[in-house]
Each structure stands twice: as structure tokens, then as C-alpha cells.
Amino acid sequence: MSHPTVPEKSPIPPHVPAALVHDFDLYNVEVVDGDYHASMKRLQATGMPDIFWTPRNGGHWVAARGEDIYEIFKDHERFSSRQLVVPRHRNPTTPLPPISLDPPEQAKYRSLFAPALSPKAVSPLGEGARALAIELIEGFHAKGECEFVGEFAQHLPIGIFMRLVDVPAGDRDQLLEWADQQVRPTSEEAHDRAFQQLFAYAAKKVAERKANPGSDLISQLTKAQIDGKPITVEQLTPMIFLLLVGGLDTVASAMGFAARFLATSPAHRRELIDHPDRIPNAVEELLRRFPVVNAGRVVVRDMDYKGVAMRAGDQIIMPTSLHGVDDRKFDDPLKVDFSRPTPIHSTFGNGAHRCPGSLLARTELRIFLEEWLKRIPDFRIKPGTTPGVRAGVNATLYSLNLVWDVK
């Protein structure tokens, strides 16, 4: 798999002191033993500033501590969502509602997703996820091995999502490729080309559902209203584009990191097998320890934030992984402890932009643990292989070879 080249350094702005500059590229993180999150924790080493400026990817701030990540997510008045990624030229000129809008405008669009992701709606989706999980596991169980990402993680949550929006299963591989280029681009050309192709796909689906609506989420959204008027194709198409990128990547990535951990820890597997009632809390602990999103904001006005001089237009990235591994927020944060009190984390963001699909994500992760451990209680990383990790807007495992004894 190809990787992006390291971007050149940008000049340091006059308002950024040398003491706050640290060379960091979120698209090129040196990962040890497949543990992206422990590798990211190096940004919290002794002597590192809580907020620093990196000259990579056009130059931007990075919030390295949980307190600031949590606070910035909630503070839309000082930190706007209109620029979500670095470098800034990768932000589309067309807004992507609701994620790239700020309140109160953002709420008009976010509310349209609520019925499809409510507890009532997620329950039958969970039933479908369980049936699919069992089918997938039974399909490779007798082999004694699988490539977890390609044979499971990119099927379970993505299969449920594709049913939710009613897109053909045969489109899966192409959609995954386009979505991957949006969050982990291998080049500017590949990113831009995939953006255009995925946007055109979204527009096609909107046109199809307007002409022949069904019961799926895209069809429901074609009937929505904004400010008392029917939603337009121009308003809806970027929403569907965003829905496709988010639905095709984040849960599959989180599931991959959770599986990698469990493959290396027989004690944690045994705990959940012996005490299945701990699985819901295990889901929260795994979400705390293995978040995948590096979310961006743009500074709204010149200000002093906790002694750091920020200027209007500065970009800032909040790596959710750094909240989860912050020793100021959690005792022994790199340790996975299923008895840990339910943690407050930033895995799904916070505030107005908290991920509306968090309930579905939790449901899918819970079902993965329940059904996998029933059938494959003892598994390990295949000897001679190393989990393949890629950093980016979302971090991911792109390969994870697992083996187990067949009885």
C-alpha cells in the first residue's frame, strides 16, 4: 500500500514562539508494534507543551491534552468547524452539512439524521449486525485464520451502513477506496480525484432516490425540509458525501485496533468470556483507549488561549487518541481496564458536533465482542506478520492477520 510523502515545512508565523514549535505530521506517524495510540502518546512526553505548532501540512496548532481537546470540541464560538482538515486547501469549497457548519445553522441539518440513528431505529440495525457478524465468522472459522480487516471489519459495520443507505454491495470496494483517499490521501491528485468521484456518486444516489424513493436514509433525507422549504439537491448532495465518508471508515478502523489488542491479551479475552456482562463497559474502555479521529477546527478571532497566542484563521487539530491516553485524565492510561469507571472521553467528539452515529457504533462493537468471543475465544496475530497501520484524518489498521486453533 502506498503512503503519502512527507510535506514540506511552512514558515513559522510571527505570533508563534519557538518554544511552542514541534515537527509533527499527522499523516506520517511512526508506529511501534501496531499501537498507534501509544506511539501518539509521545506528544505528551515531559517537556512537550500542551498545545504546540507544527510547520507540517501548512502549519497548524495541535492540542495534546485531554482537557483542551474536550474544551475545544465544545467551544464553537471560538473554534469553528468550517475547516476540518489540514492542510487547509483540502477543505472543500462546498460546505459539508452538518459537520462543517456551526450552530445554530448546524442544528437544522443534524436533526435530520436523528430519526435514523435513534435507539428505536438502531435496535433492528443491531439485529442485522448480529446476523451478519455470525455469518462472517462462520465463513472463515474453520480455516483457523483470517485477515481481520478485509474479512470482517470492512464488512460488519460497513455492511450495516450500506443497508442503512441502500447502496449496492458491489459498490463496496470502490466506495472504500474513495473514502480512504479522503482521510488518508496518498497524494493531492488522488485525494482530489477521489473527492470528485465520491461527490458524483452521492449526487447520483440523491437523483435516484428523488425519482424513486424507498425506506432508506437517503430517501428519507430527500423528503426533508430546511427552514420550512424542501431540501435541495445542492444541500443534500454534500450531506450524502459526508455520510458515505464517515460511515465507511471510522467504526471499521476502531474495530481493527480493538481486535489487535485482544489478539495480544488472553487475559482480557478470558475476562469477557467468563463475565459477558462486562462487555458494555469493555466497549467504553476500548473506545477510550483506541479512538481514531484527528479532528480540526479553525480559530475564529485573535485570542489568548491558556497563554497561547492564537490568531484568526489558525487551524488546530485535536487528536482524540491523546485524550484517551492522557495521564492527567486517567490512571495508567495505556492500560486497558474493563473495570475502569465509565470514562469521559472525546472519541465521538463533544458539544454540538458529537457524532450522531455513536449509539450504532457502540452497538456494532458490542456485537463484535459477543459473537466473536463465543466462536473464537483464543486468537493471536499470525506469526511473521505485523499489523499494518496508516495515520491520517482517521488512523486505521489496513491489515491484521489473525490465527487460531481449530478443534
Image (cartoon, rainbow, N blue to C red):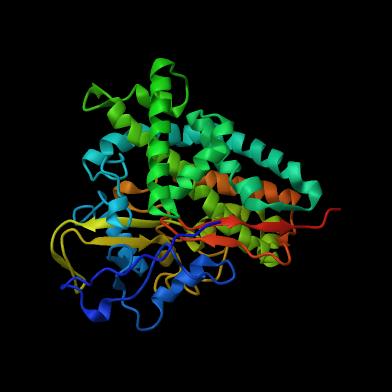
Identify which residue, 82 or 258, lies in the foreground.
82
Left or right of 28? Residue 270 is right
Q: Residue at x 68, y 52 (%)?
A: 147
Above or below for 124 versus 156: above
Above or below, 118 relative to 296: above
Q: Position of residue 94 (x, y in %)?
A: 27, 40
| Residue situated in front as seen by the camera: 238 or 218 | 238
Can residue 356 be seen here?
A: no
* Residue 188 vertical placement versus 219 (above, below): below
In the displayed structure image, the side of residue 145 where residue 58 appears, left or right:
left
Name the residue rendered at 86%, 53% in the picture.
407
Q: Residue furthest bottom?
A: 47
Residue 70 or residue 38, whichever sits in front? 38
Which residue is the extreme one toward the right? 407
- Image quarter for residue 34? bottom right
Q: Is residue 264 left or right of residue 86?
A: right
Q: Residue at x 61, y 45 (%)?
A: 367
Q: Is residue 66 visible?
A: yes
Where does residue 149 sit, x and y in percent of width and height?
61, 51
Q: Residue furthest top?
A: 211
Q: Quadrant of residue 194?
A: top left
- Residue 196 at x, y percent in the picture: 38, 39
Query: Most extreme residue toward the front, as rendered?
Result: 189
Left or right of 144? Residue 136 is: left
Q: Tell me residue 334's x, y (percent).
A: 52, 71
| Residue drawn at the location 47% of the way across and 42% of the way down | 247
Q: Nearer the viewer, residue 17 or 339?
A: 17
- Position of the N terminus, as image quadrant, is bottom right
Q: How many marks?
A: 0
